[in-house]
Amino acid sequence: MQGIKGAGLGLRSSFMDAIDQHEAPEWFEIVPENWVHMPPGMEQRFAAVAERFPLVCHGLSLSIGGNAPLNIPFLKELKSFMDRYGIEHYSEHLSFCSIDNKQLYELLPLPMTETMVNHIAERVARTQDILKRPLILENASYYYVPYQEMEETEFINAVLDRSGATLLLDVNNVYVNSFNHGFDPKAFIQAIDPKKVAYMHVAGHLEYAPDLLIDTHGTDVKDSVWELLDWTLSQGFNQPVLLERDNNIPPYATMLEEYTKVKELCQRHA
Amino acid sequence: MPKLSLDTEVQRRFVENITGDTPNLSRALKVYGMLVGYRFEEVIDNAFARLKPFYSEAAWQTLVQHFIARGGRAPYIWQVPDEFRRMVKKEEKRPWVNELFWYEWIEIALHKARAKRSKKRALSFDKTARLSPTVRIKHLHYPVHRRDDDSALEEAKGDFYLMLYRNPEDDEIMVTELTPFMYRVLKRLSNHPTLGDSVDEAARHFGEKPKEVREVIFPALAEMFKLHLLI
């Protein structure tokens, strides 16, 4: 990924006033849906951040596996936003969040079928045509598989092969899914071609029940996930890593302490 | 049937299960129902914090569940409160509740509105004038803007001509009461080719002399222009 190296941090509006007072991360990731309609006072501060740091957009509402036509005005608004701030990278989720134009604002599990692979490949091409940027797709966490003709790694690899998209490998999602569905997370990661990975995510999850983890992004990263990230980085996945936090967000200075751990891991494996 | 239709049918059924009242769901499906529910409840409850006490907890939950089953339409979750408000409005018979719904939603809408700046150097009665997208005016019948005692709203019926706007200095949402005269001028700006025409029409409507009214009203309009509320 051009311009994106090492460790990054998810940018929250609550961090904006503190960024200049602390050591800064190497890059930031933003959820564009949260920033496209920001008020002018925030726009000036955001423009300063965009000027100073490389940014990656990580979207939520594309619904790449949805059945309704892509929302073209939304994509055009997104393109205009990314153009305005010079953001070149855009990632989304291998999931759906709407059906029959009914939006649920949650990442829902896809049927893992050959037809879905082709459907997604077509929508990736259309999305890229509009955004004029390559699409990066994230392996999603899921608690239920609606229908399955193939294993998840087969599904992901087929989507990447057919669409030409690259992967945002979410190590926490791999861990959560492996725990909930009983597979080996390392075998999962070994089934992914490191050359097809654009960057990686790490985040915290909730131990909801003794046999169920939920991907909340609302806690610190668990030791088991740090270990999996460390191992992944040792396996030739030397891509940038982003620390995500979407709930129970601590102050920026606290967040940087956890970020430092990501940075050290990236440096150790560089 | 094309194969994608089968995938779509699977997805559709999944969504119906997690957003409806299907009995005996598996734990995994209940988790999805819970995640979707939290997502909607958080944004709706935060948007309508003053309004929620007008409903019993059970009635509010029913409305939210009904909305979830129908889903949102916009790609931006911050627009959900408006869609929720429009759905409830069809059934809600209490006018003060509907006015409070509008008021709480407009505070969000103005916060998100994209500002436009006028290309004009100065305000003139001979030129067009429009309200900025960061301004809303409304004639309400309950003082929902006073925030003093929401439980007394029903008894406080009257005429309240409001202007809500986002202050360009600090992005705070402000509210001010307008005179009926000023409300008419601003409300009808788009009906007239110039600002002067709008003022003159309001003067005639209220039985005033247009020339005198122009002199009196100009400072207030000029202040609005300075704040980029008139463009």
Image: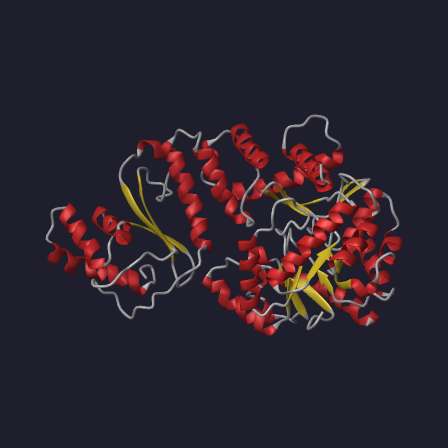
Q: Position of residue B36 (x, y in %)?
A: 64, 40
View extreme (front): residue: B1
Specify the quadrant of the image occupied by residue A181: top right
Specify the quadrant of the image occupied by residue A227: bottom right
Judge whether residue A216 can be spotted in this image: yes
Locate the N terminus of chain A and report the quarter of the image it occupies.
Answer: bottom right
View extreme (top): residue: B23
Q: How many marks?
A: 0
Q: Position of residue A19 (x, y in %)?
A: 59, 68
The one nearer the camera, A38 or A79, is: A79
| Residue at the spot 65% in from the left edge and 49% down from the top edge | A63
Locate the C terminus of chain A and report the quarter of the image it occupies.
Answer: bottom right
Q: Is residue A102 above or below residue A46?
A: above
Q: Position of residue B7 (x, y in %)?
A: 72, 40
Judge left or right: residue B118 versus residue A61. Answer: left
Judge whether residue A93 can be spotted in this image: no
The one nearer the camera, A142 or A16, is: A142
Q: Position of residue B186 (x, y in %)?
A: 27, 52
| Coloration of the structure image | secondary structure
Judge left or right: residue B71 versus residue B186. Answer: right
| Residue at the spot 23% in from the left edge and 58% down from the top edge | B195
